[in-house]
Image (spheres, helix red, strand yellow):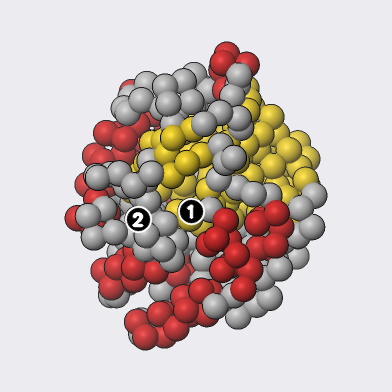
Protein backbone atom coordinates (compact mmCIF):
# COMPACT_ATOMS: atom_id res chain seq x y z
CA UNK A 1 0.00 0.00 0.00
CA UNK A 2 1.22 3.47 -0.77
CA UNK A 3 2.26 5.53 2.20
CA UNK A 4 0.45 8.51 0.77
CA UNK A 5 -3.11 8.54 -0.41
CA UNK A 6 -4.13 11.53 -2.44
CA UNK A 7 -7.50 13.01 -1.86
CA UNK A 8 -9.01 15.90 -3.72
CA UNK A 9 -9.58 18.88 -1.51
CA UNK A 10 -12.42 21.28 -2.02
CA UNK A 11 -10.03 24.20 -1.77
CA UNK A 12 -6.31 24.64 -1.64
CA UNK A 13 -5.60 21.70 -3.82
CA UNK A 14 -2.37 21.38 -5.73
CA UNK A 15 -1.84 20.01 -9.17
CA UNK A 16 -1.54 16.68 -10.76
CA UNK A 17 0.61 16.62 -13.81
CA UNK A 18 -1.19 15.99 -16.99
CA UNK A 19 -4.20 14.81 -15.04
CA UNK A 20 -6.57 16.16 -12.45
CA UNK A 21 -6.21 18.55 -9.57
CA UNK A 22 -3.97 17.99 -6.63
CA UNK A 23 -4.60 17.71 -3.23
CA UNK A 24 -3.74 17.26 0.27
CA UNK A 25 -2.67 13.90 1.31
CA UNK A 26 -3.36 11.37 4.01
CA UNK A 27 -0.47 9.30 5.33
CA UNK A 28 -1.13 5.72 6.17
CA UNK A 29 2.20 5.10 7.86
CA UNK A 30 5.70 4.24 6.67
CA UNK A 31 8.23 6.48 5.01
CA UNK A 32 7.25 9.09 2.47
CA UNK A 33 9.25 9.16 -0.74
CA UNK A 34 9.24 12.31 -2.82
CA UNK A 35 11.26 12.37 -6.04
CA UNK A 36 12.14 15.51 -7.92
CA UNK A 37 14.23 16.76 -10.79
CA UNK A 38 14.76 19.51 -13.32
CA UNK A 39 16.23 20.25 -16.72
CA UNK A 40 14.46 17.85 -19.05
CA UNK A 41 14.86 18.47 -22.77
CA UNK A 42 11.79 17.26 -24.62
CA UNK A 43 13.78 16.17 -27.68
CA UNK A 44 16.33 14.08 -25.85
CA UNK A 45 16.16 10.48 -24.78
CA UNK A 46 14.67 10.31 -21.30
CA UNK A 47 15.71 6.98 -19.78
CA UNK A 48 15.69 8.61 -16.34
CA UNK A 49 11.92 8.01 -16.02
CA UNK A 50 12.52 4.26 -15.70
CA UNK A 51 14.65 4.80 -12.59
CA UNK A 52 12.18 7.30 -11.16
CA UNK A 53 9.22 4.98 -11.67
CA UNK A 54 11.25 2.12 -10.16
CA UNK A 55 11.81 4.26 -7.04
CA UNK A 56 8.02 4.16 -6.59
CA UNK A 57 7.69 7.73 -5.30
CA UNK A 58 4.58 9.03 -3.61
CA UNK A 59 5.00 12.31 -5.45
CA UNK A 60 7.20 13.73 -8.20
CA UNK A 61 8.12 17.41 -8.29
CA UNK A 62 9.32 19.14 -11.46
CA UNK A 63 11.60 21.97 -10.33
CA UNK A 64 11.77 23.76 -13.66
CA UNK A 65 13.21 23.66 -17.17
CA UNK A 66 10.75 20.80 -17.53
CA UNK A 67 10.92 21.47 -21.26
CA UNK A 68 13.11 23.80 -23.28
CA UNK A 69 10.51 26.12 -24.74
CA UNK A 70 12.49 29.29 -25.35
CA UNK A 71 9.86 30.97 -27.46
CA UNK A 72 7.22 33.67 -27.48
CA UNK A 73 5.05 31.53 -29.75
CA UNK A 74 2.54 29.73 -27.55
CA UNK A 75 1.86 27.14 -30.24
CA UNK A 76 5.54 26.23 -30.17
CA UNK A 77 5.56 26.11 -26.37
CA UNK A 78 2.50 23.86 -26.37
CA UNK A 79 4.05 21.56 -28.98
CA UNK A 80 7.10 21.16 -26.78
CA UNK A 81 4.96 20.31 -23.76
CA UNK A 82 3.15 17.81 -25.97
CA UNK A 83 6.50 16.24 -26.85
CA UNK A 84 7.13 15.65 -23.15
CA UNK A 85 3.65 14.21 -22.74
CA UNK A 86 4.36 11.71 -25.53
CA UNK A 87 7.45 10.23 -23.87
CA UNK A 88 6.54 6.67 -22.81
CA UNK A 89 8.60 6.86 -19.63
CA UNK A 90 6.87 10.05 -18.62
CA UNK A 91 3.51 8.43 -19.26
CA UNK A 92 4.50 5.65 -16.88
CA UNK A 93 5.34 8.27 -14.27
CA UNK A 94 1.83 9.68 -14.68
CA UNK A 95 0.51 6.23 -13.85
CA UNK A 96 2.80 6.03 -10.82
CA UNK A 97 2.23 9.14 -8.75
CA UNK A 98 0.94 12.70 -8.76
CA UNK A 99 3.18 15.41 -10.15
CA UNK A 100 3.70 18.95 -8.93
CA UNK A 101 5.51 21.48 -11.08
CA UNK A 102 6.93 24.93 -11.39
CA UNK A 103 8.66 26.34 -14.43
CA UNK A 104 12.14 27.81 -14.67
CA UNK A 105 13.37 30.10 -17.43
CA UNK A 106 13.32 27.77 -20.44
CA UNK A 107 9.80 26.46 -19.90
CA UNK A 108 8.71 29.96 -18.87
CA UNK A 109 9.85 30.81 -22.39
CA UNK A 110 12.94 33.04 -22.10
CA UNK A 111 16.48 32.03 -21.18
CA UNK A 112 17.28 33.67 -17.83
CA UNK A 113 13.98 35.55 -18.17
CA UNK A 114 11.86 37.37 -15.63
CA UNK A 115 8.89 39.73 -15.59
CA UNK A 116 10.03 41.31 -18.87
CA UNK A 117 8.97 38.22 -20.82
CA UNK A 118 5.93 39.45 -22.77
CA UNK A 119 4.07 36.11 -22.78
CA UNK A 120 4.37 35.45 -19.06
CA UNK A 121 0.62 35.29 -18.40
CA UNK A 122 0.04 32.94 -21.31
CA UNK A 123 3.00 30.79 -20.32
CA UNK A 124 1.86 30.52 -16.70
CA UNK A 125 -1.61 29.47 -17.84
CA UNK A 126 -0.13 26.89 -20.17
CA UNK A 127 2.00 25.44 -17.37
CA UNK A 128 -1.06 25.12 -15.14
CA UNK A 129 -3.06 23.64 -18.01
CA UNK A 130 -0.42 21.08 -18.88
CA UNK A 131 -0.10 19.91 -15.32
CA UNK A 132 -3.84 19.61 -14.94
CA UNK A 133 -4.45 22.30 -12.35
CA UNK A 134 -8.16 22.52 -11.65
CA UNK A 135 -10.21 25.62 -12.32
CA UNK A 136 -10.93 26.02 -8.59
CA UNK A 137 -7.26 25.73 -7.59
CA UNK A 138 -6.01 28.90 -5.87
CA UNK A 139 -3.23 29.18 -8.45
CA UNK A 140 -5.85 30.01 -11.03
CA UNK A 141 -6.77 33.06 -8.96
CA UNK A 142 -3.50 34.96 -9.08
CA UNK A 143 -0.65 35.77 -11.43
CA UNK A 144 2.20 33.26 -11.61
CA UNK A 145 2.26 29.56 -10.78
CA UNK A 146 3.15 29.61 -7.08
CA UNK A 147 1.15 27.35 -4.79
CA UNK A 148 1.35 25.03 -1.82
CA UNK A 149 -0.16 22.01 -0.19
CA UNK A 150 0.08 20.46 3.25
CA UNK A 151 -0.54 16.77 3.60
CA UNK A 152 -0.55 14.22 6.36
CA UNK A 153 -1.66 13.81 9.91
CA UNK A 154 -0.32 15.82 12.87
CA UNK A 155 3.30 14.94 13.54
CA UNK A 156 3.71 13.74 9.96
CA UNK A 157 2.68 16.73 7.93
CA UNK A 158 4.60 17.42 4.75
CA UNK A 159 4.18 20.82 3.16
CA UNK A 160 5.27 21.44 -0.42
CA UNK A 161 5.70 25.10 -1.31
CA UNK A 162 6.16 25.85 -5.01
CA UNK A 163 7.75 29.23 -5.66
CA UNK A 164 7.49 31.14 -8.91
CA UNK A 165 10.96 32.67 -9.38
CA UNK A 166 10.26 34.01 -12.89
CA UNK A 167 6.94 35.80 -13.28
CA UNK A 168 7.74 38.75 -11.01
CA UNK A 169 11.53 38.77 -11.08
CA UNK A 170 13.25 42.05 -11.81
CA UNK A 171 16.31 42.21 -14.10
CA UNK A 172 19.70 40.95 -12.94
CA UNK A 173 23.02 42.75 -12.99
CA UNK A 174 25.62 41.42 -15.43
CA UNK A 175 29.05 40.55 -14.10
CA UNK A 176 31.50 42.93 -15.82
CA UNK A 177 34.52 40.75 -15.20
CA UNK A 178 36.41 39.17 -18.10
CA UNK A 179 36.34 35.46 -18.71
CA UNK A 180 39.86 35.09 -17.39
CA UNK A 181 39.03 37.05 -14.25
CA UNK A 182 35.99 34.89 -13.60
CA UNK A 183 37.90 31.74 -14.39
CA UNK A 184 40.50 32.68 -11.78
CA UNK A 185 37.67 32.87 -9.22
CA UNK A 186 36.11 29.63 -10.46
CA UNK A 187 32.98 31.56 -11.45
CA UNK A 188 31.12 30.08 -14.42
CA UNK A 189 28.07 32.34 -14.69
CA UNK A 190 27.18 35.78 -15.95
CA UNK A 191 25.64 37.70 -13.06
CA UNK A 192 26.69 39.52 -9.95
CA UNK A 193 24.78 40.49 -6.81
CA UNK A 194 22.85 43.72 -7.15
CA UNK A 195 23.01 46.51 -4.60
CA UNK A 196 19.55 47.72 -5.67
CA UNK A 197 17.31 46.71 -2.79
CA UNK A 198 14.16 47.77 -4.65
CA UNK A 199 14.43 44.78 -6.99
CA UNK A 200 12.31 41.76 -6.24
CA UNK A 201 12.55 38.09 -6.98
CA UNK A 202 9.15 36.92 -5.78
CA UNK A 203 7.09 40.09 -5.97
CA UNK A 204 4.96 41.59 -3.24
CA UNK A 205 1.92 39.31 -3.47
CA UNK A 206 3.98 36.11 -3.52
CA UNK A 207 6.04 37.28 -0.54
CA UNK A 208 2.83 37.94 1.44
CA UNK A 209 1.44 34.54 0.47
CA UNK A 210 4.71 32.80 1.40
CA UNK A 211 4.58 34.27 4.91
CA UNK A 212 1.08 32.89 5.30
CA UNK A 213 2.15 29.46 4.10
CA UNK A 214 5.16 29.30 6.42
CA UNK A 215 2.87 29.95 9.37
CA UNK A 216 0.77 26.88 8.62
CA UNK A 217 1.31 23.74 10.68
CA UNK A 218 3.79 21.36 9.09
CA UNK A 219 6.62 19.09 10.23
CA UNK A 220 8.58 18.96 6.97
CA UNK A 221 8.52 21.83 4.49
CA UNK A 222 9.93 21.31 1.01
CA UNK A 223 10.34 24.77 -0.51
CA UNK A 224 10.80 24.41 -4.26
CA UNK A 225 12.77 27.19 -5.97
CA UNK A 226 13.73 26.67 -9.60
CA UNK A 227 16.99 28.55 -9.00
CA UNK A 228 19.43 27.81 -6.20
CA UNK A 229 18.77 29.49 -2.88
CA UNK A 230 21.85 28.82 -0.77
CA UNK A 231 24.79 28.70 -3.25
CA UNK A 232 25.51 32.25 -4.35
CA UNK A 233 29.02 32.32 -5.78
CA UNK A 234 28.83 30.67 -9.21
CA UNK A 235 27.60 33.75 -11.05
CA UNK A 236 24.70 31.68 -12.36
CA UNK A 237 21.10 32.64 -11.68
CA UNK A 238 20.37 32.30 -7.97
CA UNK A 239 18.81 34.09 -5.01
CA UNK A 240 22.26 35.48 -4.29
CA UNK A 241 21.92 37.82 -7.27
CA UNK A 242 19.45 39.70 -5.08
CA UNK A 243 21.13 39.40 -1.68
CA UNK A 244 18.42 41.38 0.11
CA UNK A 245 15.79 38.91 -1.12
CA UNK A 246 17.89 35.91 -0.07
CA UNK A 247 18.31 37.42 3.40
CA UNK A 248 14.60 38.24 3.53
CA UNK A 249 13.80 34.58 2.84
CA UNK A 250 15.96 33.37 5.70
CA UNK A 251 14.51 36.10 7.95
CA UNK A 252 10.97 35.08 7.02
CA UNK A 253 11.68 31.49 8.01
CA UNK A 254 12.84 32.80 11.37
CA UNK A 255 10.05 35.31 11.96
CA UNK A 256 7.30 32.85 11.05
CA UNK A 257 8.82 30.11 13.24
CA UNK A 258 8.68 27.74 10.28
CA UNK A 259 10.50 24.54 11.19
CA UNK A 260 11.58 21.72 8.94
CA UNK A 261 12.47 23.75 5.85
CA UNK A 262 14.55 22.15 3.10
CA UNK A 263 14.98 23.90 -0.25
CA UNK A 264 14.72 21.91 -3.49
CA UNK A 265 16.20 23.55 -6.59
CA UNK A 266 17.24 22.93 -10.18
CA UNK A 267 18.61 24.91 -13.14
CA UNK A 268 22.37 24.16 -13.05
CA UNK A 269 22.46 20.77 -14.86
CA UNK A 270 24.02 18.80 -12.04
CA UNK A 271 23.20 17.69 -8.48
CA UNK A 272 24.60 18.99 -5.23
CA UNK A 273 23.67 19.63 -1.61
CA UNK A 274 24.52 22.93 0.02
CA UNK A 275 24.00 24.12 3.59
CA UNK A 276 24.12 27.47 5.30
CA UNK A 277 24.00 28.64 8.89
CA UNK A 278 22.59 32.03 7.90
CA UNK A 279 19.06 31.05 8.95
CA UNK A 280 17.54 30.18 12.33
CA UNK A 281 18.79 26.61 11.89
CA UNK A 282 20.88 24.82 9.24
CA UNK A 283 19.22 25.39 5.89
CA UNK A 284 19.85 22.79 3.19
CA UNK A 285 19.47 23.39 -0.53
CA UNK A 286 19.18 20.11 -2.44
CA UNK A 287 19.74 20.75 -6.14
CA UNK A 288 18.79 18.10 -8.69
CA UNK A 289 18.85 19.28 -12.25
CA UNK A 290 20.02 16.62 -14.62
CA UNK A 291 16.96 14.71 -15.85
CA UNK A 292 18.41 14.87 -19.35
CA UNK A 293 20.92 17.71 -19.23
CA UNK A 294 24.60 17.35 -18.39
CA UNK A 295 26.60 20.37 -17.36
CA UNK A 296 29.24 22.27 -19.18
CA UNK A 297 32.49 20.52 -18.24
CA UNK A 298 33.26 22.98 -15.47
CA UNK A 299 29.89 23.88 -13.94
CA UNK A 300 29.83 21.12 -11.34
CA UNK A 301 33.31 22.15 -10.21
CA UNK A 302 32.43 25.83 -9.84
CA UNK A 303 32.83 27.65 -6.57
CA UNK A 304 30.34 26.77 -3.84
CA UNK A 305 31.61 27.15 -0.31
CA UNK A 306 28.23 25.91 0.94
CA UNK A 307 28.55 22.53 -0.81
CA UNK A 308 28.54 19.57 1.54
CA UNK A 309 31.63 17.37 1.25
CA UNK A 310 31.19 14.82 -1.51
CA UNK A 311 27.65 15.93 -2.27
CA UNK A 312 27.96 16.60 -5.98
CA UNK A 313 27.08 14.50 -9.01
CA UNK A 314 27.59 15.43 -12.63
CA UNK A 315 25.79 12.72 -14.60
CA UNK A 316 22.06 12.48 -15.27
CA UNK A 317 20.18 11.96 -12.03
CA UNK A 318 17.09 12.70 -9.98
CA UNK A 319 16.60 13.62 -6.37
CA UNK A 320 14.83 11.69 -3.64
CA UNK A 321 13.68 13.04 -0.31
CA UNK A 322 12.68 10.16 1.92
CA UNK A 323 11.09 10.98 5.24
CA UNK A 324 11.57 8.17 7.75
CA UNK A 325 9.03 9.00 10.44
CA UNK A 326 10.15 8.09 13.94
CA UNK A 327 8.97 10.80 16.27
CA UNK A 328 11.92 12.78 17.59
CA UNK A 329 14.19 10.44 15.63
CA UNK A 330 12.63 11.29 12.27
CA UNK A 331 15.21 11.58 9.50
CA UNK A 332 15.26 13.04 6.03
CA UNK A 333 17.31 11.14 3.48
CA UNK A 334 18.42 13.40 0.65
CA UNK A 335 19.65 11.22 -2.20
CA UNK A 336 20.83 11.82 -5.74
CA UNK A 337 20.03 8.72 -7.76
CA UNK A 338 21.52 7.73 -11.10
CA UNK A 339 20.03 6.48 -14.36
CA UNK A 340 20.16 2.94 -13.01
CA UNK A 341 18.71 3.92 -9.65
CA UNK A 342 21.92 3.75 -7.65
CA UNK A 343 22.51 6.29 -4.89
CA UNK A 344 25.18 8.72 -6.10
CA UNK A 345 25.26 10.59 -2.80
CA UNK A 346 23.20 10.73 0.34
CA UNK A 347 22.90 13.19 3.21
CA UNK A 348 20.88 12.18 6.25
CA UNK A 349 19.35 15.13 8.08
CA UNK A 350 17.74 14.63 11.49
CA UNK A 351 14.44 16.49 11.42
CA UNK A 352 15.06 17.74 14.96
CA UNK A 353 18.05 19.71 13.60
CA UNK A 354 15.70 21.81 11.47
CA UNK A 355 14.25 23.89 14.29
FE1 LIG B 1 17.06 27.41 -15.84
Q: Is mark 1 within 8 Å of ligand 1?
A: no
Q: Quadrant of residue 172?
A: bottom left
Distance of label 1 from label 2 (alpha carbons): 9 Å
Determine the residue located farthest toward the left in the rendered image: 141
Residue 117 pos. (x, y %): 32, 72
Given residues 173 and 50, the one toward you in this image is 50
Given residues 89 and 212, the one toward you in this image is 89
Callout 1: few (<14), some (14-19), or many (20+) C-alpha neighbours within 10 Å?
Answer: many
* Residue shown at the point (60%, 30%) measured from the top left: 30
Q: Quadrant of residue 231?
A: top right
266 versus 231 height, above or below: below
Residue 129 can be seen, yes or no = yes
Q: Quadrant of the N terminus?
A: top right
* Residue shown at the point (42%, 22%) measured from the top left: 154
In the picture, the disc for residue 25 is: none
339 versus 44 height, above or below: above
Mark 1 touching mark 2, by CB under 8 A? no
**In terms of secondary structure, where does tag 2 sit?**
loop
**In terms of secondary structure, where does tag 1 sit?**
loop
Mark before the other along the chain sequence, 1 or 2: 2
Given residues 326 and 334, the one toward you in this image is 326
* Residue shown at the point (41%, 79%) measured from the top left: 77
In-image side of 99 versus 257 (left or right):
right
Residue 352 pos. (x, y %): 56, 17
Q: Is mark 2 within 8 Å of ligand 1?
A: no
Reading the image, the residue beneath label 1 is 98
In-image side of 241 versus 181 (left or right):
left
* Residue shown at the point (60%, 80%) measured from the top left: 43
Residue 142 pos. (x, y %): 21, 55
Residue 282 pos. (x, y %): 56, 26
Reading the image, the residue beneath label 2 is 21
Given residues 175 and 59, the one toward you in this image is 59
Amino acid sequence: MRSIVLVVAAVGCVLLAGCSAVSPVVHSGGPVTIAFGACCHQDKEQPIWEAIVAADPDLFIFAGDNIYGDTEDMAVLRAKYDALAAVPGYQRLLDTCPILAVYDDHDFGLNDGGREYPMRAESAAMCLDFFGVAAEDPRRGHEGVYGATVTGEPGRRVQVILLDTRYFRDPLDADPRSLSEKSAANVVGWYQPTADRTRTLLGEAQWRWLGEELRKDADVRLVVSSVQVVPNEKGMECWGNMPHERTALFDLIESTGAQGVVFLSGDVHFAEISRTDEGPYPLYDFTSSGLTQSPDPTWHQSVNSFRRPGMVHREQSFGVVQVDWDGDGTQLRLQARTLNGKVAFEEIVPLRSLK
